Every structure is written in C-alpha cells, then in structure tokens.
Image (cartoon, rainbow, N blue to C red):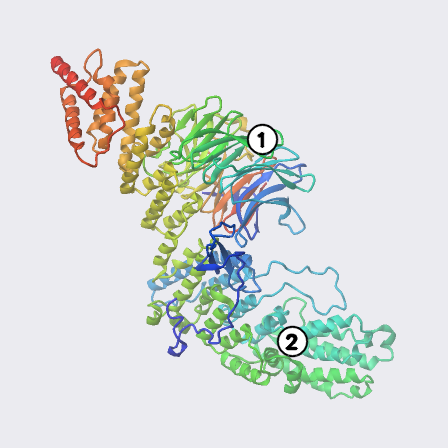
Amino acid sequence: MAFAESQNPLRVYRIPQSRYIDAVRWLSPVSPSDRFAAIAYFDADTNSPSIEIAYVDPNPQSSSPTLTPQSSWTSPSRISSLRTAHSTPQPLLAAATFSGSLHILASDLINGGVMESEATVSQLGFHSGPVSAVDLREGGTECVSVGEDGRVNLVSFVGDSSKLNYRRIFDSNGLVGYTAVKWASPSEFATGGYGFGIQWWDQRTPGGPVLQFKGNWCQGKTSGIVHSIDIHPSRKHTCLAGGSSGTVFAWDRRAAQQPIVLSGAGTGEAPNSLLSESEVWEVQYDRYTRRSNIGNISSTRILPVMICSEDGILAVIEQGEEPLELLAEPCAINSFDIDRQNPSNVICSLEWESLAILTRS
Amino acid sequence: MPGVSSDSARGALVPLSPESPAAAVYPLRHGLKSPISRLSISWSRGNSLRVSVFAAPSSDGSVNDSDGGKVVEVKLGGGDGEISEAHWRRMAYGSVSPFALLQSRKNAVSSLSKMSMNSSPYDGDWWDYIMEYSKDINALLVNQKSASVPVLDDPKSVITKGEEPTSLKAAWELLEMFYAEKPSHSWLPERLVDWLAVNIDYDSLFSGTHPTVHSKLVDFQKELVNLQVVEDDPKYWEVMSSALAVGWLNIVVKMLRLHGSYRLDQLSNRETENGLVEAVAVLISKMPRMRLEHEAGKLGECYKAKPDFVKAWEKWRGQINKLDSSAFWFQCAHQQTREGLRSMLQIMLGNANSLCSATYNWIELYISHFLYMRPLTVGLESMYSLAQKSIQLKPMASAHRLMGLIIGILGENTEVVLAECLKGFGPWMVAHAIELLTAGSDHAEMLLHEERQNLGGISIEELHRLVYAQVLSSFPLTWQIAPIYLISCMKHGMVLLQILLSKQPVQDNQLLLKSIEICRLYELHSVTSNIMKIAGVHHWKHGRKGSGVFWLQQARDEYRLNRIALQLFDSVGKTISDESFKQWEGLIQLLGSDSKTAGGLEFLHKYRDFKKSLRQIHDGKATDSARQAVESLISLMKNPSTPQRFWLPLLYDSLKLLNWKERPLLNVSQTNLLLNKLQELSMARLRPDFIESELPPQALNSVRLALGTNLGRAILEE
C-alpha cells in the first residue's frame, strides 16, 4: 500500500469540534480565495442537531486552518444526509433528517453566510422513518430523496412557497429499501440499497426502475449495503458505488451484470490489495489529478476515486494501481467532500468529534 | 463493581471516603399541573437519570394537555468543574491510541522476555515507551483556551500568565515525575521545584481561600502600578522573600531591579544602597543548583555532579556570609532596604524561621527546604520525612486532592496513590495512571496484578479498567472506545464486551454497522449474528421488509426467514399481480439464487420465474415459454418449501398450460405428480387448520378436469 507522504506533500489539520459531525460539505466559494463549509452537527450534551456554515481560513497566522462559524440553523432532528448545489452566491443545501423530513436551506455567502430555511417537507407520508439519502440536482430546482421504507420521492422547489410539494416516483412498500441516491442527468438518477443492488431510474419511464443491477455477483460470500453512489458528468453510463466489506465497484450500464470491482469483496486477489475490510461510507470521483486530463483516460477505464471508511482510511483508488492512502486515522471517517473549485482541498469528518482538512499540493 | 462497596473495616481495596457528602437536591421541572401519581426512575446515558412522571388522571374525566406525563432528564453532579464534558471526551478519544500502543508493546516485551529467560523485561526501550505514553497523555490535558502571550515585555509585570494549569495535568506530571522518568531520584527535589513553577497559577489548584506565594505576587502586581517608591512598601520585601523561598529567581531579580536606587536621578546619592541591592541580585542569579540543565534564560548555575555542586554551594554560601557581615550595611540609610535584603540573605542561608515565615503552606515550605537547607536530599524516604515535618510546621485546614496525592507518592503507598487518583480525578485517571505505577516497581506490579478473591477473582488493574470502560459505555459518543479497554481485561473483559455490543441500538444502519465492525475486529461472530437477527426483526416489524430479509439472511437465520416467509406469502397471494411485480422484483433479487440463505423464501424466486414465463405466453411467445413454465411449475410442486396453500393457485394459474391446444405439455408422470398433489390437497381440506385460497369455488374442479384431460392426451401420445 502506498502512503501519500512519500509521493506528494500533503498537509493535514485536525480541528476538534466538541460535537458529533453527521455530515460535512464544501460550499462553492464566492471568490477564489474564500472557503466555506456546511457542517451538520449533533451536540450530544444538549441533544440538539444543527447545520452551521463556517468560513474556513486556510492560512491564518497560526499556520493551521481555523473555522469561523458564520450562521447556524437548528434542525428538528439529526441530519441523515446533506447535499449542496453549486450555485453562487447563494448555494443551496438539501438536508434530510432521521425523522423523515427534508429541508432546503439557502445561504448568502456575501452577507456573512446567513442561512435561511427556504422550504420544508415534513408531511406525514413523505417518508416513513428516516430519509436515508437525498441528492440535489446540479444547478437545478429538484431533489430526489429515498428511504429504507422503499419510497422514492421527487421534490421540486420552484418559486418561493415555503411548503414544498413532492411527487412519489415509486413505493416498494418496504419490499426494497434504498440507502443511496445520485442524479445522473436532469431526468435520470441511480439508487443503491441492500445486497449491493443498484437501480437506474428515468423520469420519462415511470412505474419503476428502468434497469437493475443485481447485487448477487459476490456469490453469497459476503453481501452488503451500498452507502454511497457517484456518477461522473462525463461518464454517465457508469455508476460508482461504495459499501460494506470495503467494497468499491463500478457498474457500466452498457455492459452486462458484471461489476468492475475496484476494492474489497469479490476481488479474489491477494489480501494485501485490500484497502479496507469495513464499511466504505462515501465515494466520490477525485477530480484532483496531476497526471493527465480526464479526456485522455480511455472511456472503459474508471476515473480515480476517493473513499473513506469505518476503519479510518481516506484513500484514492485508481483502477489497476496501488491505492494511495491519504489518511489512516484511529477512528472512523464518516464523510468527506472534495472542493469542486479547488480539488486539492478535502474536508472530512472523524468519529471522534473532529474535522480534518487536507491540502494536497 | 465487586468489592468496592464492601465496608472499609474488612480492608476494601478502593477506600471510599466515609464522610459522604450532604444529600444533593435536584429540582424537577416537569410542568405538570395535575398531581403526580407515579414516578419511574432509570439510568439514561452518562450520569443522567431519566425520570418519568405520570400524572394522576383528572377526576372529572375531562382531558387536559397536561394529562399523561412527562419524561425529564436529570444530570447528576456537575462533574469536574475544571474539565468540560467535551474536553473530557477529547481526553478519552486521545488516550486510546497511546494506551493501545503501550499495551501492544507490553505484550511484545513480555513475550520477548519469556523467550530469553535471563533478560529483564524492563530495560532498553522500555522506559522510552513509558515516557512516550506519559507524554502523549500529558499533551491531552492542556486546556484549549490558552491565554494570549503579551507582545511587549512590560517592565512592571513581574509574573506572566501562561497556559492555565489544571490540577489533573499537575497530578499527571507528578506521577510522570516519580514513576515514568527513568529513575533519577537525585534530581527529584529540583523536579518538584520546577513542577511548582510550571503550575505557577496553583492557588486555584490548591485552595482558593488560603494565600499562596503566587496569590501574594498577583496581589502585589496589582498595587505595583500605583506605587511610586516600591522599596518603602513592606509588601515589596515580603513578596520578594516569598518568591525567593520557592526559588523563582527570575522574578526576584526582576523585582529587585525595580528598586528606587537604580533610578538615574538617585543613583549618585544612594550608591552604597544600590551596590547592596545589586550584590544580592547577583548572588541570587548565581545560585548553584544540582540539576541537569535549565531552560534558557533561567537564573542559577547548574551542576550535574555532586562534588562540583558541593564545592560551588559552599563557595556561594561563603559569599553570602561575607556580604551579610560586611560593613556596608551600616552605610545603607534606607531601613526597609537594609532589613529586606538581609532577610533575603537569611533565606538563602537556609534560616529555618525565615523560610517558615516566607511561605504560606507546607508544600511551599517543603520546596524551600529543598532549595536552601537540604539540597542533597536523596531518596523517597527522606523526602517523605521532610514532607511530614513541613506539614507539622504548616498544617492545612483542608487537604487538597493534589496534596493527598503527593503524600501518597512520597509515602510509597501504591494503594493510597490509587485511591487519591480515584477520589480526586476519577476513573479515567486511575485507568491510565496504573500504567505508570506498574512501570518500574515490581512491588506495585504484584499488588495491582494479583488476582483477588474479594474482587471476584480479578486484579485491581482489571477492576479499574472495567470501571473506566463502564463509564465510557454509558455515553453514546464514547461507547465505541470501551472495547479497547475491555479487551485488555483478561477475566471479565470479553463477556462485558459482548454485553455492551448486544445492548447497542439497532435502529440506525450506521450505528448497527459500527457495532458489527467491532464484532468483526474481535471475532465475536455469535454476537454479530445476534445483532443482525435483532436488526432484521426490528426492520421487519416496522414494515421495511427488504431490510428485514437482508439482515436475517446475513445472520443465516433460517428459522426466522421461514417464519417471515409465511407472512410474506400472505401478501404474495394477494398482491403479486402484474402491476406490483416491480415491487417484488427487488426483494426477489435480494434473495439471490443461493437457496441456503433464503430459507423458505426460495419459493418466491421460483414463483417469480414461473410467473414470468406465464406472462410471456400471454405476450404470445408460445411453445418455448410454455415449456419453461411447465418446468417451473413441476419444480415448484416438487419442492418441499412450496407452501401447500399455493398449490391450488399455482395449478389454477396453469390451466392454460394444462389445456394447451397443440399438444399435451405435461407427460404422464408429471400429470400423475400433479394429480397426487391435488389428492393430497383434497385430504388436507378436511383438516381444521386449512387455509382456503381466494379462488372461485369451481377452481378445484376445473383443475381436476384439466389434469384428467391432459392425462388422457398424454397417454395417447405416448
């Protein structure tokens, strides 16, 4: 396993927060030097969940970055999923909760990062139980939410009505539970769930998933749950998924039911190529690449992927190469986000109530 | 906690203070108007109590908002006032890695020493490991809010405020000094002097009400701004003598230089006076100290070897004596200066009365004795007797937790040290301090590792680790750390770990998976499958059938899968129509083709295949699909996992196949099999527990007729 330190300089700063962090996302900056992050906290002492916008000062006098809280919004329940849409200067946030509600927040980064709740869906019947994942359509006005209750809801927020309306796209009545969702195009999205299954949906073809990827490829050895999906805008035919047993795989919709396993279960290779054996909580395509531009990489090759895991690994995986380990923490890394504008910056949340900010150069 | 609550008369190992504090009163704010009929109290997370207050139902039968009850949480105790909950958790998180690293090194060292009998386990890198551990832990105890350091050096500021010390940090440093540093006991007195100086702001540490040298300094600092002629103020001399007594040489020299005789306009007519002040300042800054080295900028001259030190010490004292008996004193006109300086000389000469009057509590007196009377004190025994003497001279009304700890350490009484740690600083301190106590002392190691009957067969070390693990387990954010400490407990650790894991909530997938991950690390497979079963049933009960089936499958729980299969079939019979097929598709895929893990649900898989081929017949893709459908039908009917109540619906669905126009699709033996099943079904209908399927009443007859016809055609064909 390759360690990052030996190959490229990496600066890591850990910032204790004294509160549990449920999710963390970068916000698109107003100016190139600004850095803002949205952090979903849970204060265990007072039992209060909240979302805060913080200004991340990358280089104050004391050499390590500081977080300056700008504004805070109190959530009715803990945040189960947090996504941001990259529109400036008022980035939108979609926050889903464990009590089954969805909140759209807008933050004005020019005027001190004031955060306002734009709209809320919390009607009975929106989801029963927690919303397990939500995704905001890039620059759009729609988001899709899924839950283990088997409901797939589309929420559109045009205009300024504070009560959102949602449209039920599908309801499996609990026979299938969904744990991850990601937009692919304005009409298509992918969901993931139990047994490493992935479903492909197209709003133009209602009534159920258009395509299903069967998760039984690991032949009963170990099965698991998909925790996170990512789809690259230039490779919409490929779904990248991460889940249990250190599994990271890609499913090419055009190809058959055989996945491209990047790490973990089903690789059948020597155990030393195993990056992690525990839950992969999040996967994202790593847009930070020094080698060549993405266009040159053959379209059958999977682009570089960053993952974080329960056993404290933050790493970059490239198909057919040794994974590059960026962090090996003594506690779980529950979520991370790569800065869109400046992909050398990564922020991640650690189990032991702290944030880590990485700068690659 | 075995053994702890047993009375002290029987020699409890962890003495709890007999003077129990006065009962604390916690007001409950439940907001209920109606009278309370019942209270229920249970433990919540951490040291909170959950109190459920039930209101008495109103007598007139009307329904009010306040009817029913309220659940309130009551936080017991304020914890340690010094350390916030968040800081406590940060310490708990941070100490995991050093603790785990030390344990693995200990194991490596002990297995190594087993291999080579003659080498002692405690040599070479051992002390480096202990020191590394101690430094790592110590680094966690720094209070986050450190005071800002002033940029300008104020000439009138005699004391600077560094980071705020906590008594926990001070206590850890004491333990580190006495137990972790490679035995260098000849430097110990000087280390104590440094310890007191580092924890300079110790009046908050020892006692808020009693004066200390430091508090006097702080008071004087405030007055200093308004003083025109410092040397006229008796406090100036008093405070300087005190600071000198505890060895804060830099502060004393800085204060001496504030003396009015240094001012340019007065220098000419106070020449002798100034000479004396400067002579004392120089003597102070040349004080010989027996220690390794000083921090840069600290006054005093260091000597490592005893003979060199003794020589320098004698010479220095000679110089002081010479100055003391010099004739210049008579030429000094300023009375306060003359007396003040000479009393400082007495302190430097080790005059017992001067030392006693310059210090405010026994620990300061103790330090001053080391500095000026017995710089060569070696060994804990003589340090202890000196401490006893100091306490006699300056008894303290209330014993501070640090004082008790110092006495315990000097008295070489491991039990007292442990008890003081527990009483004053809590389970975290004890669990981690034991590593230092046992580091170099065979006696302490034996004492703490010996298995004791009155503790249920565990050692004191294990007891304290278990106690700490229990504390960790009771908080939702720290329970994941507890396993690290539990697995280091040989006797009861594993069992308690299993209980801890089994008690974790299963509702949330993320938490559930975190528990399962811990099970995987410690190879607790039975606990894993239990947790999965609980999760499966939980999800199933809450209507998340897919999640329920998944977890039960992961747990390979065939019994429950079969049970829930029966319930699933009920809804299959009703809802597997063409529209709802998409809902089922996902679940059937989840079940996979591996029949072993699917339990009775295997039937669903085949049923889906059968339905699919039937539908294709409807779509018009004739004979091949029909053949496939027949094969699915036969395998379904042959399979014992197909519930009996599905037999008739299956056959009724296949009427089209039985009456296939072109040629009979079922051969003789296949038809016979189906006829036998039909016969069995007719017999079963007579039993009282038979469940009638929702089919038209003539269904059975039409199937029987179709089968008969098919049999005839098949016989003819063969």
The image quarter in which residue B320 lies? bottom right
Q: Identify residue type, mark 2.
A: Thr
Relative to A66, B155 lies left or right: right
Q: Which element type, helix, strand or loop, lies under badge 2?
A: loop
Above or below, B229 against B601 in this view is below
Relative to A323, A46 lies left or right: right
**Residue at image mark 1:** A157
The percent position of residue B348, horizontal first and vertical second, equals 67, 82
The percent position of residue B30, horizontal first and vertical second, equals 52, 57
The answer as to whether the residues below labels 1 and 2 share one chain is no
Q: Tell which of B299 and A106 is nearer to you.
A: A106
In the picture, which quadrant includes the C terminus of chain B? top left
Task: Specify whether residue A261 is in view.
Answer: yes
Residue drawn where x is 62% and y is 76% of the image:
B289
Q: Which element type, helix, strand or loop, lies under badge 1?
A: loop
Q: Which mark is residue B432?
A: none
**Residue at image mark 2:** B212
Residue drawn where x is 51% and y is 50% of the image:
B64
Circle nearer the viewer, 1 or 2: 1
Spot the residue most to the top: B662
Residue drawn where x is 53% and y is 55% of the image:
A45
Q: Identify residue type, mark 1.
A: Phe
In the picture, which quadrant includes the N terminus of chain B? bottom left
Q: Tell which of B230 and B596 is nearer to you.
A: B596
The percent position of residue A345, horizontal first and vertical second, equals 58, 40
